[in-house]
Amino acid sequence: MSEIRLAAEPRNEFGKGAARRARRAGFVPGVVYGHGHAPVHLNLPGHDLMMALKTPNALLVVPIEGKDEFVLPKAVQREAIKRTIEHVDLLLVKRGEKVTVEIPVLTEGELAPGGNLVEHVLNTLPVEAEATHLPESVTVSIEGLEAGASILAGDIALPKGTTLAVEADAVVLQVIGAQASQADADAEAAAEAAAEA
């Protein structure tokens, strides 16, 4: 995963009024914490932050007290209707440090014929990896799977240096059989009744 550099500025004003002024100027208020460091308050460029957060577990580089530091998004508060970013909490991480994150589970391939469906029991997979080498996602093949089949966390091939942060027997995906619609069931019952009459 590549690093995304953000030109953050120190934030000295606090409260709702200061946050509104920052947002009007195109910034998002944020706070960086971790490693026993006192929380650092920043204003981050809104558009750049929004684009960076489209990547799951984006590794951001922000200037803190004159030094570039690695941070991971920990909590993102969004406006309820417009979904714009209102505030972000960032976790300070070091190169070589292991962190636990959740990565999206993607599927590839086609199920066995018969109208079966894939149910995502877990949409994301908790894993532990080095902070500067976090996988963006994991892809699972569902090629030819039939109803009743399931894929466990331990069945998924993880990128090198990544380990599971969930039980290996946790169900991630399962294939469920096609459900006959009520109209089909009613038509079948009517046909049977007509045949008996």
Image (cartoon, rainbow, N blue to C red):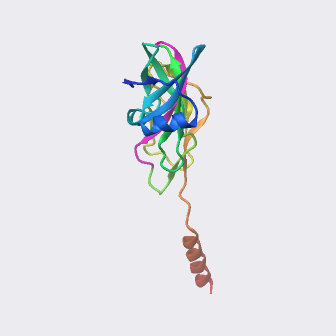
For the point 44% across and 32% down, which residue is it? Answer: 137
In the image, residue 69 sits, relative to residue 57, either above or below, namely above
Name the residue at 48% across, 12% down: 96
Considering only vertical position in the picture, is 175 above or below 45?
below
- Percent coordinates x, y for residue 91 in the rendering: 54, 23
Residue 54 place in picture, x, y as percent: 42, 37
Please tell me which residue lies in front, 194 or 69.
69
Q: Nearer the viewer, residue 41 or 110?
A: 41
Does 104 lie within the magenta span?
A: yes
Residue 180 image position (x, y, % from top left) = 55, 64
Q: Quadrant of residue 127?
A: top right
Q: Position of residue 85 (x, y in %)?
A: 48, 39
Q: Is residue 161 above or below residue 107?
A: above
Quadrant of image for the C terminus: bottom right
Q: Residue furthest bottom?
A: 197
**SS majority, magenta:** strand
Total residue callouts:
0
Depth check, front residue: 131 or 89? 89
Toward the viewer: 188 or 57?
A: 57
Task: Please report the bounds of the magenta region as a residue range.
Answer: 95-111
**Does 14 appear in magenta?**
no
Q: Quadrant of the N terminus?
A: top left
